[in-house]
Image (cartoon, grey):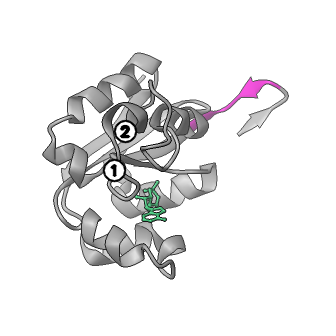
């Protein structure tokens, strides 16, 4: 959230998807978050259940690509990262690049590491309220801690 040039300290979710975990580029992605000056306040490697995926992507369940997306997210472990910092929701989305990796700009995570729409390396929350919802889906409250 931004108000008259004053940036808010926000929390957001980045999830490193199974394609990136399988390619062993977790560290390269985390380095970009840290290089930007954002703080990691929660981090874990997990396998999501079908129910977790339905909750995380509830807004896409009726879309024609949903089965493909769910099967992909269930295909291997993911890394859930809770991130905190100035204007974190939009900053992390900028770091990720646009959804379709083919169109994502060089210098972004998807632009530098991907060539796919569904297998697009990372997921990021798109709004503050959505970030709070998605962090709740993937983390228990005690798994997000202060990191000042
Ligand atoms: P993400 O940012 O995780 O949000 C929803 C995901 O659905 C998106 O990244 C892609 O992985 C996937 N997605 C979005 N649009 C399409 C599409 N048209 N076809 C297939 N997958 C899509």
Badge 2 residue CB within 8 Å of ligand 1? no
Say the numbered circle drawn on residue 145. Answer: 2
102 displayed left or right of 16: right
- The answer to which quarter of the image holds residue 46 is bottom left
Q: Is residue 35 above or below residue 122?
A: above
| Quarter that holds the C terminus | top left
86 displayed left or right of 114: right
CB-based contact (under 8 Å), mark 2 and mark 1: yes
For image coordinates 42% across by 34% down, the residue present is 111
Q: Secondary structure at mark 2?
A: loop
Q: Quadrant of ligand 1?
A: bottom left
129 displayed left or right of 93: right
Q: Nearer the viewer, residue 132 or 145?
A: 132
Evaluate whether residue 135 shows in this view: yes
- The answer to which quarter of the image holds residue 77 is bottom left
Q: Residues within 10 Å of mark 2 (few under 14, many from 20)?
A: few
Say the numbered circle drawn on residue 142. Answer: 1
For image coordinates 16% across by 41% down, the residue present is 23
- The answer to which quarter of the image holds residue 33 is top left
Q: Secondary structure at mark 1?
A: helix
The magenta span reads 5-10
Say the numbered circle drawn on residue 20. Answer: none
Q: Position of residue 41 (x, y in %)?
A: 37, 36
| Quarter that holds the N terminus | top right
For image coordinates 26% across by 65% down, the residue present is 72
């Amino acid at each position: 959230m931004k108000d008259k040039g004053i940036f808010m300290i926000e929390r957001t979710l980045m999830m490193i998807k199974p394609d990136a975990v399988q390619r062993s580029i977790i560290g390269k992605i985390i380095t970009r978050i840290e290089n930007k000056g954002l703080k990691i306040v929660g981090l874990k490697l997990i396998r999501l259940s079908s129910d977790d995926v339905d909750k995380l992507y509830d807004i896409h369940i009726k879309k024609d690509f949903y089965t493909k997306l769910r099967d992909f997210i269930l295909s291997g472990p993911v890394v859930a990262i809770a991130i905190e910092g100035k204007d974190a929701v939009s900053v992390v989305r900028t770091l990720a690049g646009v959804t379709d990796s083919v169109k994502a700009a060089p210098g972004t995570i998807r632009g530098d590491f991907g060539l796919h729409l569904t297998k697009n390396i990372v997921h990021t929350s798109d709004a503050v309220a959505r970030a709070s919802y998605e962090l709740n889906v993937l983390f228990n409250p005690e798994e997000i801690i202060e990191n000042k």
